[in-house]
Image (cartoon, coloured by chain):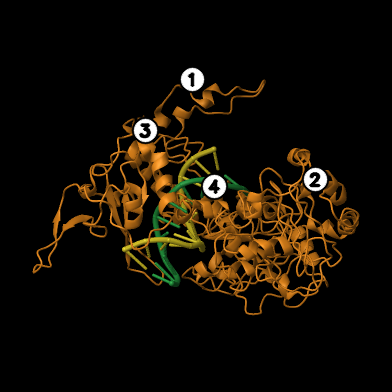
Chain colours: A orange, B green, C yellow
Amino acid sequence: MAEDWQDCPALGPGWKRREAFRKSGASCGRSDIYYQSPTGDKIRSKVELTRYLGPACDLTLFDFRQGILCYPAPKTHPVTVPRKQKKKPSKPAKAKKRQVGPQKSEVRKETPRDGSKAGSGTAPASLPAPGCCENCGIHFSWDGIRRQRLKALCRDCRAQRIAFNREQRMFRRVGCGECTACLVKEDCGTCSICRLQLPHEVASGLFCKCEQRRCLRIVEKSRGCGVCRGCRTQEDCGRCRACLRPSRPGVKRQWRCMQRRCFWHFAHRFHGHPQGCHRCPPQVVVSPTGKRKCRKSGSKVAAQHHSQAQPLPPLPAAQQPQRTELHISDLAPTSPAEFIYYCVDEDELQPYTNHRQNRKCGACAACLRRMDCGHCDFCCDKPKFGGSNQKRQKCRWRQCLQFAMKRLLPSTGSGSEEGVVSPPRHSCRKRLGSPRQLRVSPSLKAPLAVLTAPPGPAQASAKQQAGRDSVLPPPDTDLVFLREGASSPLQVPGPAAASSEAPLQEAQCSAQSWAVTLPQVKQEKADAPEEWAADTAFLTSPTSQPGCPSKAVHTDLVPVKQEPPGPEEDREENREDYISASTPEEETGGVGTPVITEIFSLGGTRLRDAAAWLPRLHKLLAVNENEYFTELQLKEVVL
DNA sequence: GCCAACGTTGGC
DNA sequence: GCCAACGTTGGC
């Protein structure tokens, strides 16, 4: 896309403008205008531009869409006269009709970029210290590339590389269609893929393609392109981190000098990110249980082909997969130990829906929540809260819980039909369930399930509500027990007097006092299909009620009191063992991820074991009603 | 496989 | 026109 950028002298040297036409969706054909500052910052609207340039810069005359300055025409002459010149900073910034996060935003924008934007009223930015492109060697502004990238590539080279990667993915999926391998119509029958004896339609599919039919234009990492600067470099530089990396005794050096790595190194190795993982969207791999898996993770079992697997009907000649024709049950192996992972076009498994709306059930408390909490990391990222708009995600407290549950329980379809749109059955595309929705605190991977009443600024009452109906997460803690309908955390939860803020739909499950939800992504990836089946069995145990989404609900659970901010020693201990009291900040939806659901992942504990340890947990809870539990205690219970 | 970043699109 | 946030992708 780099070629789409065009200079925009109206904003000064180095500014670029791009018009992007929407290629799909309801607004297909519509165009959006983006600007890029000399330092590489992307501007998406005039408001952002105003914010970016600061109040000293008057954009009144600047036509954002056209990228030109429009001076007021004579009264009788409506035609604007574009001029290519710097705008005048003399006039104070026009008050926007809608100032979003005015002060914070300005502070935020100016703080990190003061250097580049000081005096940017007309000609923005002193250029940052240049870097040297690893590929072409030219000097360029490194500052424009904000990510933590190892390769220092200039914009053009990076664009080339990205284009190359994109092309390579396409080659891997469908091939170039021109090389001799792509023209081969028959499988060899002898390669490792063919020997798996996968159904023909699968074997002739994309990533499972016969080795003899794999596109020859795929650049193998081990070979490199042979042409780029990296491939042509014969000697190690001796200075890069690879060269400096100490080799293990007795082990041949594994690290190739950074300077000798192929510029085109395909970022996703074929077997590293095959179709099925979230990096490879067009294809998914589906286990017979319905859990989609990245082939990488499923490769072991994939190698164990079950000869009795029922072949799928042949694909139409047009190679269009038969939508909705594929049923997971058709693929069920006769032995639980044996699984076959099929390449299935994702569209086969989900009829067309508006994907962008599939993340909302519209019914859960999170969906019903109107206000951003203003404190979670995603809120903090929002411009209106002074963020830099990099994450661009919905407030964590507003991320659909139903969707999360669906993702977590791919094979569980019960109990969610009541006016709830079933979220799409997405593959292991993580983004869909998204760590954004449910993220495990990296500092503590041990907690039990958590549900919290979302805190937030929106509710003075909500805060109280949170205090009443739930136990808020202590710092660095993923453990929160939500109690419904209770007047205080100390009471044994009674019938749900569902708080409108109570997450999930426990509110609908009047008999359920506690809700325990599944771990999100990390658990998902770790679980084997059979474990999911077990999980599901547990989660859909008779304790669940019709109308309730599938989730672990244990009626025997006794409430746990969340201590108020405790003594200092407790806080210290929290780092190690304790799930301690929450800080005031977190009580309002604070810095810590406001975890919606978490986790049964104590040391790899599976939900399937829950039947065994839940009673123990129950006992512990009963004994320690007013206490917190150490991670150690929880481990003892669960493990 | 995870995550941050960001292009893109929906909707107000 | 603008913002929200979904979904993709590069880096690791």
Horizontal side of residue A348 vs A302, given as left or right: left
Q: Secondary structure at mark 2?
A: helix
Q: Can residue A279 be seen here? A: no
- State how far apart marks 4 and 2 are (Cα): 40 Å
The residue depicted at 85 percent of the width and 46 percent of the height is A633
Return the chain for callout 2.
A
Q: Secondary structure at mark 3?
A: loop
Is there CB contact under 8 Å for labels 4 and 2? no
- State how far apart marks 3 and 4 are (Cα): 27 Å
Q: Which residue is mark 2?
A: A631
- State how far apart marks 3 and 2 are (Cα): 48 Å
The amino acid pointed to by label 2 is Glu
Q: Which residue is mark 3?
A: A133
The amino acid pointed to by label 3 is Cys
Is there CB contact under 8 Å for labels 3 and 4? no
Q: Picture coordinates of residue A549 (x, y %)?
A: 71, 71
Q: Is residue A395 above or below residue A107?
A: below
In the image, A19 versus A237, the foreground residue is A19
Mark in front: 4 vs 2? 2
The amino acid pointed to by label 4 is Phe
**Quarter where residue A417 is shown:** bottom right
Horizontal side of residue A35 vs A295, given as left or right: left
Q: Which residue is mark 4?
A: A270
Label 1 crowd bin: few (<14), some (14–19), many (20+), radius 10 Å: few
Q: Picture coordinates of residue A637 (x, y %)?
A: 87, 50
Q: Secondary structure at mark 4?
A: loop
Which of the marked residues, 1 or 3, is nearer the chain's N terminus? 3
Q: Which residue is mark 1?
A: A238
- State how far apart marks 1 and 3 are (Cα): 18 Å
Q: Secondary structure at mark 1?
A: loop
